[in-house]
Image (tube, rainbow, N blue to C red):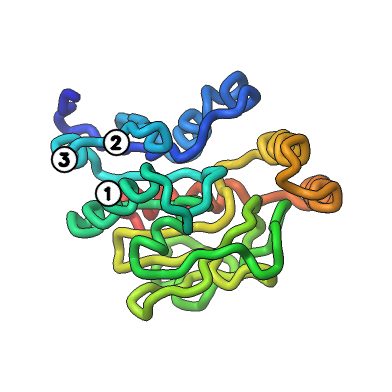
Amino acid sequence: MEELSGMKRFAVLLCAEDSDYVKKKYGGYFGVFVRMLAEDGEVWDVFRVCSGHFPSDEEIELYDGFVITGSCNDAHGNDAWICKLLILLKKLDSLNKKVLGICFGHQILARSLGGKVARAATGWDIGVRTIHFSTSIKTLANMKLPARLSLIECHRDEVRELPSKVEVLASSDKTKVEMFRYRDHIMGVQGHPEYTKDILTHLIDRLLQRNYIEEENAINGRDSVDKHEPDREAWKQLCTSFLKGRL
């Protein structure tokens, strides 16, 4: 991989297979993340870690930041690629690389830092939910953040515990750890700031078809999407600012 002098470089660590819908409309989940986070003059690459495609030590050095995506796999599982990902995340931490984890990415980051991830005690969380920020995030964000923002959620696991070195930045009435940071280079977000409403509704259909969720979950999720609007622009600004070192 050739180094492009003077250009910021970022990598998406893809932890899920692309659905046909997302592949056709957005160029896969990589395209969804690039659409949310990429800015002019940057290079974005993808490593399909769920298929065993990991960056080498030499490649790691090329990147200013990494984004870990959602997944259908459990962050508390021990699949070979998940164990390899945990080793990579510890390495990125030791190198002080910027790492942003989303949903599964949030959970696997928490695990890599010594936290505990498990099935959510209250079951699936699907739809648009209100996220409440802690007061300390005001010192983190060089932007005018309201006390709460709406965010698309789709998960059945959660971060149950975090070591004291990790700071919880946000919670919801459903999930205690909606967002966290470790020092200034690692941040996790449980929800999906990258999702559009149509991505979620198509995902709900897939989950229902595969019997991963009950009909009631699907109905409540769709109803939530119809009634509420996620604050996508504010989340985009928050995630982008963290990844680019502007927080």
Disc nearer the start of the sequence (1/3):
3
Crowding around mark 2 (Cα neighbors within 10 Å: few <14, some 14 to 19, many 20+) is some
Nearest the viewer among 53 and 242 is: 53
Residue 27 lies left or right of residue 21; in this view the side is left
Nearest the viewer among 159 and 51 is: 51
Q: Residue 183: image x %, image y %?
A: 30, 68
Q: Residue 82: image x %, image y %?
A: 39, 48
CB within 8 Å, label 1 to label 2? yes
Is 158 located above or below residue 101 in the figure? below
Q: Is residue 138 visible?
A: yes
Amino acid found under the numbered disc labelled 2: Phe
Q: Residue 60: image x %, image y %?
A: 21, 40
Mark 2 lies on a secondary structure that is loop
Is 23 located above or below residue 230 in the figure? above
Q: What residue is at 51 percent from the left and 47 percent from the top?
A: 236
- Name the residue that disc number 1 marks: 88
- Name the residue that disc number 2 marks: 54
Is 119 located above or below residue 227 in the figure? below
- Name the residue that disc number 3 marks: 57
